[in-house]
Image: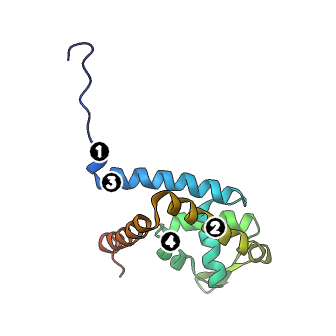
Amino acid sequence: MPKGEPKARVDFGNCLFFSTAALSRRLTEFAEEEFSKIGLAPSHGFVLLLSLKDPGIQPSEIARQLSFKPSTITRFLDRLERDGLIERKSQGRSARIMPTNRAKSMEAAIRSAWKALYVRYSELLGKPLEQELTRDIARAREVLDPKP
């Protein structure tokens, strides 16, 4: 290629993988900023919300609802247990996840961080686009990762 000529560009904007990954990175930045205000990673906040909503929930159900691998949920639970936010109660071969009083006292702050995240991206995208994207992505997830 002669010197000074622009290099050929590849347009990744029409690639679903690239577009969703780029969107995910940006939304993750927003989520990390909002949840860091309460000292949590976003994923830890969502795990806590599930344990608060359904005390005694099993790790496998948390993994299913959040679309994480069980090993990832185990790491999250290890951290939350070290931080005094959950307790594991053994029940036979399985465990039940119980939020601690400390986690219960943080519920409003966790919900507030989630709401702030929603408001932030919803305002930037506009309500109609946000709702359409959410609906379409949820449908695509169902197709690509059907429930048993």
Q: Position of residue 114 (x, y in %)?
A: 61, 67
| Residue 110 against residue 50 in the figure, above or below | above
Q: Where residue 17 is drawn, which disc sits there?
A: 3
Amino acid identity at mark 2? Gly
Horizontally, residue 14 falls left or right of residue 42, namely left
Q: Earlier in the sequence, mark 1 or mark 4?
A: 1
Q: Earlier in the sequence, mark 2 or mark 4?
A: 2
- Residue linked to disc 1: 12
Could you tell me which secondary element the residue under label 3 belongs to? helix
Amino acid identity at mark 3? Phe
Could you tell me which secondary element the residue under label 1 belongs to? helix
Q: Quadrant of the N terminus?
A: top left
Residue at horizontal 56 percent and vertical 59 percent from the top: 120
Q: Where residue 143 is drawn, which disc sits there?
A: none
Residue at the left extreme? Answer: 1
- Residue linked to disc 4: 66
Of 128 and 16, nearer the camera is 128
